[in-house]
Amino acid sequence: MGLARTAVEKHVEHWNARDRESWVKLFSPAVTFEDPVGAPKKHGVEAVHNSWDRSFRPGRRWYLHPRQIIEAGFEAAVVMRNEGHLQDRVVEVNGIEIFTVDVDGSIVSVRSFFDQPTEFALDDYFTPGRAND
């Protein structure tokens, strides 16, 4: 198992355990997020914190379920099911996420491809029309 796969597995483990501190440590200070691809890129530690904080607002809880991880070199492509608990409603967003790590295994890039849901609203931070932060 290589560095990229390990990073993805730790990302899922820490996220689902709601271990913010360990999750934040997975990322390079220079990380970029395209979440979703097509929206303005998010950069650095602030983007890491915002991604967590905007996903776990009161009344919202997300679980990650990787269906397949394909690793090649310093990258991993993941078929991911995101299960959201939004107030009393359970929702699902399926997508493909591309993770890139550096030689130390820190995540330096995340690119998320998914269709924007129409039956519920994501936080604006995860929509193509958001302002550049």
Image (tube, rainbow, N blue to C red):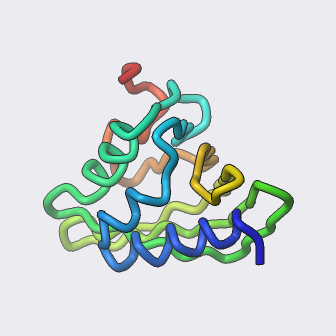
Instruction: Please tell me which residue is depicted at 60% across the width and 45% down the height of the picture.
Output: 108
Q: Which one is in front, 53 or 101?
A: 101
Tell me if residue 86 comes above or below residue 107 in the rendering: below
- Identify the residue at image location x=43%, y=71%: 83
Residue lying at the far top in this picture: please name it: 132
Is 92 placed left or right of 46 in the picture? right
Give the residue displayed 19% in from the left and 67% down from the top: 87
Instruction: Provide residue 74's location: percent of width, then percent of height.
Output: 77, 55
Q: Quadrant of the C terminus?
A: top left
Q: Judge by depth and name the residue closer to the eye, 24 or 122.
A: 24
Image vertical order of residue 119 relative to residue 4, above or below: above
Q: Is residue 78 left or right of residue 90?
A: right
> Residue 43 at what x, y percent from top left?
46, 31
- Nearest the eye: 133 or 116: 133
Q: Quadrant of the N terminus?
A: bottom right
Q: Is residue 78 left or right of residue 46?
A: right
Please state the horizontal and vertical placement of residue 11, each as a whole percent of the image.
Answer: 50, 67
Above-or-below relation of 82 to 17: above
Can you name the residue that lies furthest to the front here?
104
